[in-house]
Image: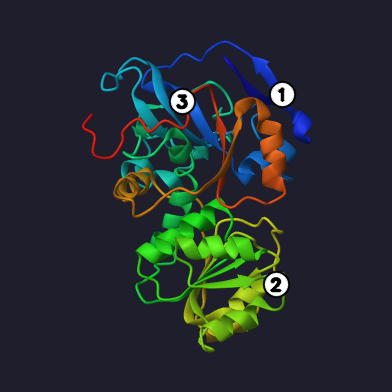
Amino acid sequence: MKGFRIARHGGPEALEWGEWPDPSPGPGEVTVRVRACALNHLDLWLRNGVPGHRFPLPLVPGSEIAGDVAATGAGVADLALGTPCLVASGVSCGVCARCLAGLDHLCARYGLLGEHRDGGYAELVTVPRRNVLPLPRGLSYVEAAALPLGFLTAWHMLTARAGLAAHEDILLHAAGSGVTTAGIQIARLLGARRILVTAGSAEKLARARELGATHGLLYNQGDFVRAAREATHGEGVDVVFDHVGGETFERSLKLLKRGGRIVLCGATSGAEAKINLRALFFKQISVLGSTMGSLAELMSLLPYFESGALRPVVDRTFPLAEAPAAQEFLARRGAFGKLVLTVGTGAREVPHPKGVAT
């Protein structure tokens, strides 16, 4: 098969195009023919390297994958070859106490495709059977590839961690990112009263409103804290949804109401921030870390895509061979929604159209 591997950290040149033998599924595994693979900032961290973190190089990047079943290993008898599928991004051991309790995302051996084992920047990828899910009806391969990591992360942040309730107010940072386009839709689905978002352009704010945002704040023009207070009539918000980190964290704390929660899943602007500890205990503020949710949570999300209540947002696609250019576009942060690599032909096909029996 053909694809990209990273054998050493560096710039775009670290993505090495090559051809190597097709993977063979072991017992309980499935090989998927990749049709589409969405990009994530994790791909850039893998390429550039992260101080203090060791990746198992050489490694094929790519965590969010949609495709067709190409081969099955021993013990997998319930999947026909050619079946369209969505691949869950997180891989766990499947046998520990946490996995058996449905908390696979807390498994000590948990890791993401494209981080701990080969991912989707290639024609084929092999994963455990439990990671192969039905492709939601009505979605193309491109759209499906744009959902498993971002939507699951946002869902877990807002439900399991922050517990966003109907009629609460929320601020979501970086409206154009894949995880925030998911978070806006989920906040709307959960019945949030005011959905405030920050972005660096009026165009992104307008598109965020189309997804359900009620107020847009330009973070690079004036003080977003003051603007958010004006939008909430001085009340502030119950929840802050953040993956920007250092640049926004301290100011975001000032916006929280008593009993408010700030939930973080990343730190793209820096991993260090100042905290006013008195504000935390006087206002009873909760600071919550979050990453991925469980496989069960992902499966519970799929009906919302089939009903149209949630929809992946794709900014643009690139052929697999143009992955270095796609990563550079991602690094410039000009996209609204996800960037997706297409592999071969048919990535924009909708295998299971709505209203058509299969």
Q: Quadrant of the N terminus?
A: top right
Q: Which residue is at the front of the view, 260 or 244?
A: 244
Question: How dense is the environment of label 2, judged by Cα within 10 Å: few (below 14), some, or many (20 and up)?
Answer: few
The residue sitting at 24% across, 34% down in the picture is: 356
The answer to whether any part of residue 280 appears in the image is no
Residue at the location (48% across, 36% down)?
Answer: 142
* Coordinates of residue 221 in the picture (x, y in percent): 72, 73
Residue ID for mark 2: 274
Mark 1 vs mark 2: give the one in front: 1
Q: Are discs 3 and 1 less than 8 Å apart at CB?
A: no
SS at mark 2 in the image: loop
**Badge 3 is on which residue?**
346
Distance (Cα) linking label 2 and label 3: 49 Å
Is residue 252 visible from the viewing direction of this image? yes
Observer-nearest of 126 and 337: 337
Drawn side of residue 221 relative to residue 62, left or right = right
